[in-house]
Image (tube, grey):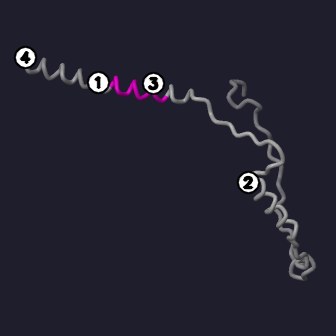
Amino acid sequence: MNLNALHISKTVAVLIILGIIVAAAIAFTLMKGDEPEETVTVSGDSTSTAEANFVSLATELDSIVFDTAILSDPRFLALENIHTAITPEPQGRTDPFSSAD
């Protein structure tokens, strides 16, 4: 019977140690998050590589030309708008969960 009491106390000790380790890990994570973030400041006329990349891509877009000849193609002009008329449905109650019918 003394062995069972010893076994239970070992289990409790292991659980307490695991709890302390988990609590320490959580405390370390929370304390680590309080460090101030580094900020990047840009001063003067210097441009970043991202800004230079954006400007070069934007200038490439200026040279794009769309061919609108398809709009005068007889096959395009022969297309018809196929639509189904939508019939209005009766509106239900404003509050479907109210007790009034």
- Is 96 one of the magenta-colored residues? no
Q: Which residue is mark 3?
A: 27
Is mark 3 in CB contact (under 8 Å) with mark 4?
Answer: no
| CA separation in Å, label 4 and label 2 | 72 Å
Which of labels 3 and 2 is toward the front? 2
Q: Secondary structure at mark 3?
A: helix
Q: Earlier in the sequence, mark 1 or mark 2?
A: 1
Q: Give the distance between the C-alpha atoms of the residues marked 1 and 4, in whole angstroms.
A: 23 Å
Q: Nearer the viewer, mark 4 or mark 2?
A: 2
Which residue is tagged 2? 50
Q: Secondary structure at mark 2?
A: helix
**Neighbourhood count class around disc 3 (C-alpha, 10 Å): few under 14, some 14–19, many 20 upward:** few
> Could you give the CA–CA distance between mark 1 and mark 3, rounded to whole angstroms?
15 Å
- In the drawing, what numbered circle is on residue 17? 1
Residue 47 rendering spot, x and y as whole percentages: 79, 51
Residue 92 located left or right of residue 15: right
Q: Nearer the viewer, residue 35 or 73?
A: 35
Quadrant of res 86: bottom right
Which residues, given as a range, are shown in magenta?
19-29
Residue 24 covered by magenta stretch: yes
Marks 3 and 2 sit apart, C-alpha to C-alpha, by: 38 Å
Query: In the drawing, does residue 53 fall left or right of residue 79?
Result: left
Residue type pointed to by label 4: Asn
Q: Provide the residue designation for mark 4.
A: 2
> In the current view of this chain or complex, which residue is farthest to the left?
1
Q: What secondary structure prevails in the magenta region? A: helix
